[in-house]
Amino acid sequence: MGSRRGAGSTLIGRGWVATACALVAGVAALPALAAGTGKPEPWQIAMQEPVTPIAHELHGFHTELMWIITAITLFVLALLVICVVRFNEKANPTPSKTSHNTAIEIAWTIVPVLILVVIAIPSFRLLRNQLIIPKADLTIKTTGHAWYWEYEYPADQGGGFKFDANMIEEKDLKPGQLRLLATDNDVVVPVNKIVRVQVTSADVIHSFAMPSFGLKMDAVPGRLNETWFKAEREGTYHGQCSELCGQRHAFMPITIRVVSEQAYAAWLTEAKTKFASTDDGSRRLADAR
């Protein structure tokens, strides 16, 4: 019996050690669970790192809501524990027959209203900032097709061309390109410039979404919706159509490359020639898919 107990104690001890190691490993892995910049990460639990003013505001609002939700959850849990401990049949064999309590009824009416007001103020401010588009430095029109995106740069802002962006198939990916997220043609914009995005659709409802920008706008046939962003950091950012739009819904990625003003000017010059000569061919290829 003594040896069995010793073996059992050893197993229990090893179990605690394994649990402690797992907890330490989990804590050490927490940074990996957060999403990176411009792309998702395996096993992420957080939103992608924000790189626009709207995205920063969205993250702040999300954090505020999490604190409120946590406080409400803990408060309700405490009430449940008190009820279980103090008002069970054994501890309280003679229950109270009180049917009304004016103070409590006033409190549980006023407190939720105050909580909603606290939530509503930053919510309305965020909606206003999203919907009121400041004076834009650049306008890009994007049209959703089944199943790819078309982008148009206006002539009065140095553009005068349009192009299609199709997902690069896995067998054609180059090193550094992301599966299901890389496109054959990227949207290129200058850093720290206000970009107005006009969104529409040529067939069914799509949705233009870019998580790191805090950007999501439905593309509706016959309607021109508008949104905006101001990228504060150079880099390549990935998004996808976030509206269930048909068979190849999962294969409508969005890639936006944010570059310096000098690099944008050079790309603009190159793009005028490139897309003027390949526009029709690229569209036929997209339609064939």
Image: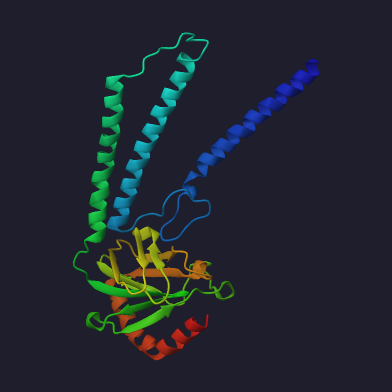
- x%, y% of residue 144? 40, 73
Identity of the residue drawn at 38% across and 69% down: 256
Task: Give the quadrant of residue 218.
Answer: bottom left
Task: Give the quadrant of residue 139.
Answer: bottom left
Q: Farthest residue toward the top?
A: 94
- x%, y% of residue 211? 39, 59
Residue 176 in view here: no
Identity of the residue drawn at 27% across and 48% down: 123
Closer-to-camera residue (234/101): 101
Residue 183 appears left or right of 158: right
Q: Is residue 267 depicted above or below 82 in this figure?
A: below
Closer-to-camera residue (259/146): 146
Identity of the residue drawn at 47% across and 70% down: 252
Q: Farthest residue toward the bottom?
A: 277
Identity of the residue drawn at 36% across and 15% down: 98
- x%, y% of residue 217? 35, 64
- x%, y% of residue 47? 41, 52
Q: Is residue 28 depicted above or below 159 in this figure?
A: above
Residue 241 in view here: yes
